[in-house]
Image (tube, rainbow, N blue to C red):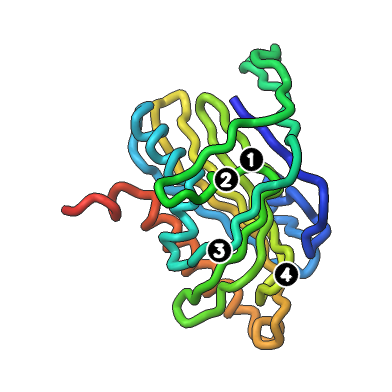
Amino acid sequence: MRRGNFQEGTVDYAAVGATGAADLMSYPPEHSIPAEASWRLGSGESRFESSADALLSWTALRGAGLTLSDVRPAAGPMYSGVGFDAEGAPVAPSRLEAEQRFDADGTPYVAAGTTIRVHGRVKGMNADGELRVISATEEPRRVAFSLGTVGGSVVSGEESFAIEWDDSDEVRFVVRAFDRPVAFAYRMLPPLVKRRRSALFQGYLQAISPLYSTPA
């Protein structure tokens, strides 16, 4: 079980962690446009584990047509927190450093504090930017992380990704985000922000869902 939060350095927005708020869609951060989507991926432990591994190896971003570069894990040890069971009892001790993992190409897995640069376009719209993993969680039935913008993007804000395996054995992929337009065109034409976000969400789904990754 791993949990991490990162405080060093800065992102370019104030409402850090707001994608985790239950009322995000009703009360988004000021001047931001919220979005959320949830998709069923299947059921069972095997589906959960394979989907979680795909998520932590940046598959969602790459599947949306983005190229990752300059992946920089946080310097120094990270506090990974204490895990708790359903009754609130601690089930794992705090750890100061989590094991670093790498994908087949040698890219570090998602970890709190990691900074990345992404490059690409979605439906003709710019998706470049520098992003930071502001939190990462690995629990027996939920794996998730949040990305915040650091700079160089046409929008400012945060997005969170989660793979959840519920008590009914269903596995779901949940993505939430809020975007504040920064670039002139996006400030003048807010629908572009929604169109860009919708295209990103669709790319994330196609990358993670077995309905798209498995040939018919």
Q: Residues within 10 Å of mark 4 (few under 14, many from 20)?
A: some
Q: Which callout, 1 or 2, points at the residue further toward the start of the chain? A: 2
Q: Which callout, 4 or 2, points at the residue further toward the start of the chain? A: 2
Residue type (three-letter) at the residue carrying disc 1: Ala
Q: Residue at position x 63%, y 16% from top?
A: 85
User: Can residue 4 be seen?
Assistant: yes
Q: Residues within 10 Å of mark 1 (few under 14, many from 20)?
A: many
Q: Which callout, 3 or 2, points at the residue further toward the start of the chain? A: 3
Name the residue beneath numbered marker 3.
69
- 54 versus 166 height, above or below: below
Which mark, residue 12? none
Q: CA distance from mark 3 to mark 1?
A: 20 Å
The x and y percentages for residue 15 are 80, 55
The x and y percentages for residue 36 are 56, 55
Judged by depth in the image, the label closer to the viewer, 3 or 4, is 3
Q: Residue at position x 39%, y 50% from top?
A: 208
Using residue 36 as the reference point, say whether residue 80 is left or right of it: right
Name the residue beneath numbered marker 2.
110
Q: Nearer the viewer, residue 149 or 196?
A: 149
Residue type (three-letter) at the residue carrying disc 3: Ser
Q: Which callout, 3 or 4, points at the residue further toward the start of the chain? A: 3
Question: What is the secondary structure assignment of the residue under circle 1?
Answer: strand
Question: What is the secondary structure assignment of the residue under circle 2?
Answer: loop
Which mark, residue 151? 4
Name the residue beneath numbered marker 1.
136
The x and y percentages for residue 43 are 34, 32
